Image (tube, rainbow, N blue to C red):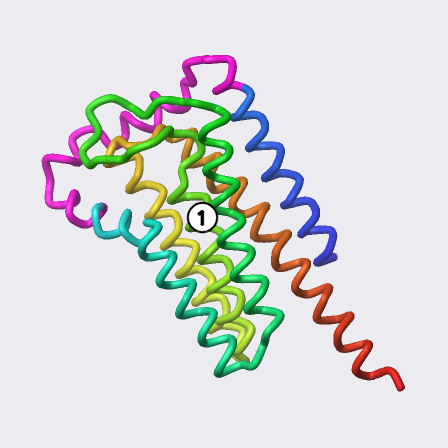
Amino acid sequence: MIKFTRVALLLICLGVFIMIMNEVQRGMALSFDDNISKIFIGVENTYWLPFFKTFTYLGSSIFIGCGSLVLVLYLWFRKKDYLAVAVVSIGVAGGDLLKRALKNFIHRNRPEYSLVEAPGFSFPSGHSMVGMIFFCMVAYFTIKGLKSRSLKWAVGSGFIFLVLLIGVSRIVLRVHFPSDVLAGFALGLAYGICCLSVYQWLKRKEGGENASP
């Protein structure tokens, strides 16, 4: 049942990403972008702006790079899980490279009148995509070490809320269209599922080999 749910979620995420990418490549004006953007009109003139600037930093390359290093060191020296070290290192770095390649392939310009400087192209949102990959891995390895089911749900929900705020911050700061963020979430989640599925498969294989005479 868990495998079926994982595969279904993976396919849904890929389908959402491909659908949005096709619309963006056709140069279509997405009503989704207009409707969602209207919700956040005027936020820049309130005390919420510093709040969202803080959360957008949590999805930046600097924060995720440093956070990945901390996670790798923790898994290496504390957990002695060298397979996890490889999966996190390759997963986050590979996700960043994929994001860059897609941006240069799609060539979607960013929204006008952004509130912070953001170089490069717009689609997909790197903060949303790589942030999703990184925090999925942090959540997974954090939850993996917990025994309480309720605590696992609380930690998982906290990380979901954090990633959502990072994506919303990119819309509020006008550096991404909502469709960039949604596509970033979808592809990031699909990519994270693949990375962690590979990790679990290799762990089972490793355990089987160690158990064999």
Query: What is the x, y in percent for residue 126?
Result: 41, 41
Question: Which residue sits at x=62%, y=38%?
Answer: 12
Query: What is the x, y in percent for residue 40?
Result: 24, 32
Is label 1 in a helix, a strand or a loop?
helix
Instruction: Determine if the magenta segment contains residue 42.
Output: yes
Question: Which residue sits at x=61%, y=59%?
Answer: 196
The N terminus lies in quadrant: bottom right
Q: Bounds of the magenta span?
A: 23-52
Query: What is the x, y in percent for residue 45?
Result: 10, 35
| Count of numbered circles in the view | 1
The C terminus lies in quadrant: bottom right
Q: Nearer the viewer, residue 149 or 7?
A: 7
For label 1, the crowd category at 10 Å Cα-Cα, with few meaning under 14, some 14 to 19 and many 20 or more, is: many
The image quarter containing residue 87 is bottom right
Residue behind mark 1? 130
Q: Nearer the viewer, residue 203 or 8?
A: 203
Q: Amino acid at mark 1?
A: Val
Query: What is the x, y in percent for residue 59?
Result: 34, 50
In this rendering, is residue 189 above or below 102? below
| Main secondary structure along the magenta-highlighted residues | helix
In this rendering, is residue 78 above or below 163? below
Left or right: residue 100 compared with residue 41: right
In this rendering, is residue 38 above or below 138? above
Left or right: residue 44 compared with residue 163: left
Outermost residue, bottom side = 213
Question: Which residue sits at x=67%, y=58%?
Answer: 197
In this rendering, is residue 30 above or below 53? above
